[in-house]
Amino acid sequence: MPKPNRSFDKSLWVFHVNTGSCNGCDIEILAALTPRYDVERFGIKLVGSPRHADALLVTGPVSRDMVDKLKRFYEQVPDPKEVIVVGSCGISGGVFHESYDLAGPVDRIIPVDVYVPGCPPRPEAIIDGVVKAWMKLERLRGENR
Amino acid sequence: MADEIIHFVEIIIGVFLVAVFGMIFGLLTKGIDRKLAAHMQWRVGPPVIQPFLDVKKLFCKENVVPRNAVAWLYNVAPIVCLTSVIAILLYIPMGSIPPILKGYGDVILILYLLTIPSLAMVAGGFASGSPFATVGAQREMVLMMSYEFPLATTIIALGWKISTLYPGEAAFSLTTFTKYPVWNIMGPFGIIGAIILLVVMILVTTGEITKVPFDIAEAETEIAEGVFVEYSGRNLGLFYLADAVKTVVMASLIVALFFPYNLSTYLGSSIHLPSIAWNAIDFLFYLLKLEIVIFFSMTFIRVSVARFKVDQVVKVYWGYLTLAALIALVLIALDILL
Ligand code: SF4
């Protein structure tokens, strides 16, 4: 895996995957981009293609139909990459717990680095989750040194 | 023989300097653009050096080549794109510093060279073998065909005026445009025509550097970044750089055609400085003019409006802007006849 350099901390491009969420978390992610929270000042940018992304922002409990798509999204992100799960339903199933159509939670399908709990979490919590992701990158730098 | 070698070495050093300048200043411009756009939306915005960090990050990421891509074309397209925009920059004067390849080409050549970056993007899009990229490449071609005509009309109108006034000069050479600034040689009709042409040129620039509202080829909400959908890592970084340099190129073209004024011509007689200092001042003045042009052709428009649909883009360029350019051409023709 290529070694992440320092600029990763200041320029993290995220790709947002919705795996069957209720749209609550998706709105909160958008709220983090609005002028009130303005995550662009940390260099965080929402991109339109997983190939450009450094981090996957996964919301939703992963319905059966989304399993192979989620795997493919994960594989399409170039290394070094990380996965941030936003919302309780991606962590444990949340309100969709014991649903007949549930293949998740997310960490049953792809490796997850950061969990952001809440239904939905506040934008501050999502920003905090991204900061935790930076800590993982710092660890990777330490390991690879 | 020795002269030729010295000339050759000069050109090589010049090319190197211009390339470094284009990339650094292009990235800086992108940063300033993002900062200004953020302030216009009441945000704080990223630091001005953000594009440098982005490129640095992209260059250390994994470079994925999709299995069904045409690998050599896919990898060569970003390089062609970047080198061709740098090549255009060699033909454009910067302040009072003449272009590196002075005398080897004129505006007509620049017109042709300007299509190469777009063609490289189209080739890269088709080569990446993704349906999104194919749609993006087709849209890029549509866009390219749309803005070409108003752009050509603008340059021809200006060149025509100069060639009738000064038959002895090379009508389409950028040095001639610099020597006789548009606003000094035009009559009343011509001034109106030139203002229309300036507006046309600014809108063509927005399309040329594919920014909102003309970014149909990279529409990330519709076709997932279009031509760039499969690009990652180093290749994406090269495209990012090429886009930055292209912004500088287009703005420089506007500055060279419409605002070729230098401070040294006006203040040189009253303030005495060595010529190298004047060169530096003119160069800084040129950078200032670039930033102003870029603000109006990119940041301001980008923040104010939303993206056009494909057919609307064609209508704007082929309909309104072509019409405006032709009216300006008629006005300038009147100006020549009267
Ligand atoms: S965590 Fe709650 S708000 Fe978020 S997507 Fe799941 S159900 Fe909706």
Image (tube, rainbow, N blue to C red):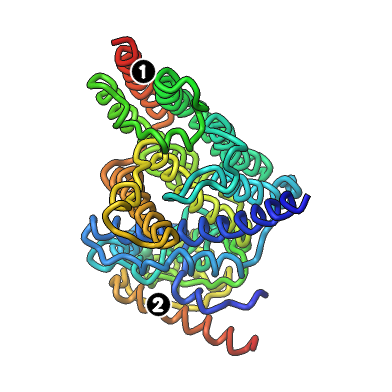
Q: What quarter of the picture does the C terminus of chain A occupy?
A: bottom right
B109 and B276: which is toward the camera: B276
| Label ID, residue B169 | none
- Chain of the residue under the numbered disc 2 shown in the image: A
Can the viewer see residue A36 in this picture? yes
Q: Mark 1 packing: few (<14 Cα in 10 Å), some, or many (20+)? A: many
Residue reaching furthest right?
B1
Q: Residue, x 55% and y 37% (percent of image)?
A: B114
Q: Position of residue B200 (x, y in %)?
A: 35, 30
Q: Is label 2 in a helix, a strand or a loop?
A: helix
Q: Nearer the viewer, residue B230 or B87?
A: B87
* B83 is higher (above) or lower (below) than B137: below
Q: Against B236, is A37 above or below?
A: below
- How many callouts does the rendering have? 2
Indicate the amino acid at tag 1.
Leu
Q: Position of residue A8 (x, y in %)?
A: 50, 74
Q: Nearer the viewer, mark 2 or mark 1?
A: 1
Q: Quadrant of the N terminus of chain A?
A: bottom right
The chain letter for the residue carrying disc 1 is: B
Q: Is residue A56 above or below residue A115?
A: above
Quadrant location of residue B215? top left
- In the image, what residue occupies the spot 56% across and 78% down? A5
Q: Taking B240 as reference, is A131 above or below it?
A: below
In-front residue for pair A109/B81: B81
Residue at 46% across, 69% down: A11
State the separation of the CA atoms marked 2 and 1.
Answer: 58 Å
Q: Which residue is mark 2?
A: A129
Q: Which residue is mark 1?
A: B329
The structure residue drawn at horizontal position 43% and vertical position 30%, both measured from the top left corner, is B310
